[in-house]
Image: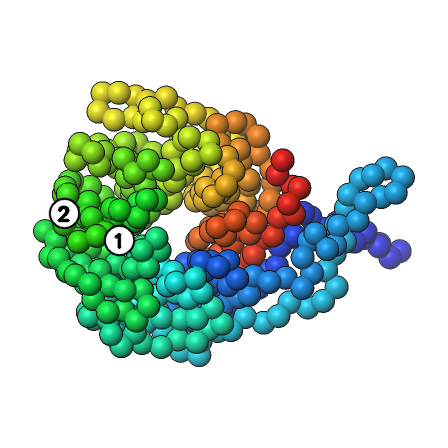
Amino acid sequence: MTMHKPPQAMTLFDLIARTWVLDTDVRHVLFNGAGTSVVAVLGDGRMAFFSVNDAEHPESRVRVEADTGRPSIRPRTKPLPLPVISEEPVARPDVQLCRLGEQGFAFSHADSGALWRATGRGQTLRVSAAPIDAVTALAAAPRNGRILMASGKVLVLAVAEGGAEICNATLPHEVSRIVVSPDGRMAGCWGGGQVSLVSTEDLSVRKTVDCDGQVSDMAWSPCARWLVAGCEDKAMVLVDAQAGTSDRIVDFPAAVRTVGFSDKARAMVASGAFRVVGWDLPDLPFGEHEGTPIETGKPGLTIVDRIAVHPKRDLCAVSYVNGLVMICRIGHPDEMLLREGTGAAVNALAWSDDGAHLAIAGEDGSLSITTFPKNMFK
């Protein structure tokens, strides 16, 4: 007797996501400023470029049943366009790339560490006017059209278009990560167990404070008072930029690989536990004060490995160590299953600036761009 299995039902993820599988793990993923292109840095240093434009956008595939009024999304019928992938390693996987203008990206070259740039369509070339080699950290200051780059202890402020130096400074420690505040006025520069708070106008150092641990992610609060850093040693460092002091929050069950602030939810959130960890703003835990904790999503038996805060809504994307991806409402138990667990961890999550697209990059070489219909989040 022949057993006929029914076809497997398509999931929401199958219907609204485009997925490519590359031949090695994906380390970083980033949308350009215009939201038209996504770049992925692979584990071997190659770069892959994907167009955000979707010939079969989910909204164009929505159908409303005449009798019930229930909407549905029909499956795709066309093959996905192939990404543009560099033939050789071009980017250092251990250095975060950043945006360059509205269309492009800046990165540290795999061989020399020199500053290079890439267009959204995958063309790469050296920034000839860049003043330093061996770039160890990068960050964009888009409000004033500038870029910050570090080489060891030397920090340089340069014009984004062309890379010409504006000024430079020598910090009391090496720099391997830079993050610019939301108002564009200050940068947090971390390295060697310290973080310097630096003006983006003239690179003057406001404060240098202790920030022990191997930092994996950093984020500024919307008001630019707080700088939070997630650490691989199961801890989080919170820096009060106004007072120039820091405190360490310890005893997470796992490494705190991602942190973030939600302006919409007025909260700080972090990964590294069995649910999304968070506190209300401005009542954060510092010193003897415990702050006001909030609960996001539902607790489980699997560690929250990474999070990405939605830029417009009180939501965050959440990935678990088994590859499961959820969308959670910050400060509420509400959550929506986006992708079933694949068995492979997610290496990076990134939203487009308008919050319409979520990029998911995996250690299994998968890269997905999930596009949400406008009426999905109400």
Per the image, the residue denoted by label 2 is 205
Per the image, the residue denoted by label 1 is 177
Give x and y (percent) for residue 197: 19, 45
- Quadrant where the C terminus sits is top right
Q: Quadrant of residue 83?
A: bottom right
Of the residues shown, which amino acid type is indicated by label 2? Val
Out of 55 and 344, give the one closest to the viewer.
Answer: 55
Q: Quadrant of residue 194?
A: top left
- Quadrant where the N terminus sits is bottom right
- Of the numbered discs 1 and 2, the one sitting upstream in the chain is 1
In-image side of 223 versus 86 (left or right): left
Label 1 – label 2 distance at C-alpha: 16 Å
The residue that appears at 15% across and 43% down in the rendered structure is 206
Rendered position, 267 above or below 10: above
Give x and y (percent) for residue 150: 21, 60
Secondary structure category for the residue under label 2? strand
Of the residues shown, which amino acid type is indicated by label 1? Arg
The residue that appears at 37% across and 28% down in the rendered structure is 281
Rendered position, 310 above or below 350: above
Give x and y (percent) for residue 368: 56, 57
